[in-house]
Amino acid sequence: MDLHRMFAKTSYGQILAPRVRFGRYCPETVSEEEWRCALGADVNNLEHMRLTYGLTRQFIRYQNTYGEEVLSREDQKDLLLAATSHDWGESIVGDVMFDLKTDAVETQEATAIRRIINEMFGNGGEDLPARIEQVISDVVENHDTRLGKMFRVIEQLGYLRTGLNAFDLSQQIDDPDMQTGLQWASSNVLSNQIPSLIDVADQYPAVYFFINENAELITEAFMTIPPSVFSNYEAGEDQKNLCKWADAQNIWKDAEFV
């Protein structure tokens, strides 16, 4: 967290501080400040990393308490370091939603993070910047390594957490524009995260427990969100995302959590 505070004081941290995540779902009638207040720290570009740090600590606790694969002290440090620094590059590249992120975008983010590390620490012989670069390479950018797979799942849990918060809030408000925006965000998250998270629920206890604890809310979201929200996508994207939604619904119906 000292590293997070250090980054927050840089010009790059100050760029991220006022920015929102999930911005494409925010209605024009709703201010960015209202959007942040509604959905909390995860929709703030800077505070998202602090929240991911907390989710990572929970993931580690569940893994080392219930999982077959125990995380060593070094594993834990690398995952926590990844959580703290993984989105630094977005201060240069900008935030791109999960389903829109391409290999080219990830390459740009990787270049940006290395530039920021160099500017923060210089070219000295300190161990920390080298450790950060190694973690970015092995854990954040490489989704095929052991820790890379885990961190990918932690990020997906973060998306799902915010998507469910968005749906829950949509059921409590009367503003039709805000309700539609929240349900649009939620539908996108559930479509993209539920199928792959169900696949790894047996492997990672944090996934199993989170989905199990929120199973009723997930079912309610799949049953409640209307197909009309998909008209908010651009032409051609609406039907593709509607099909993805239907596939995720069917996978959820067949899951052991229902």
Image: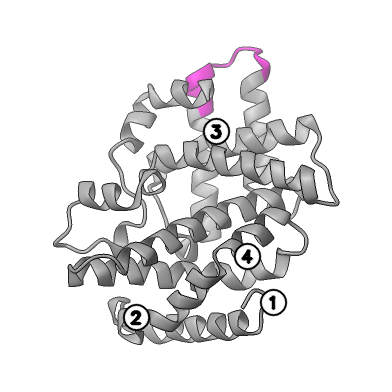
Q: CA distance from mark 3 to mark 2?
A: 37 Å
Residue position marked by numbered label 3 in the rendering: 114
- Secondary-structure class at tag 2: helix
Q: Which residues are magenta?
A: 117-127
Dot 4 falls on a residue whose secondary structure is helix
229 with respect to 194 (left or right): left
Q: Nearer the viewer, residue 141 or 59?
A: 59
Question: Which of these two is toward me, 180 or 17?
Answer: 180
Mark 4 or 3: in front is 4
- Mark 3 or mark 2: which comes first in sequence? 3
Say few, some or many: other residues with alpha carbon within 10 Å of mark 1 (under 14 / 14 to 19 / 20 or more).
few
Q: Which mark is residue 256?
A: 1
Residue 126 in magenta stretch: yes
Give the residue type at disc 2: Phe
Residue drawn 30% across the image and 85% down it: 228
Q: Which residue in the structure is indicated by mark 4? A: 212
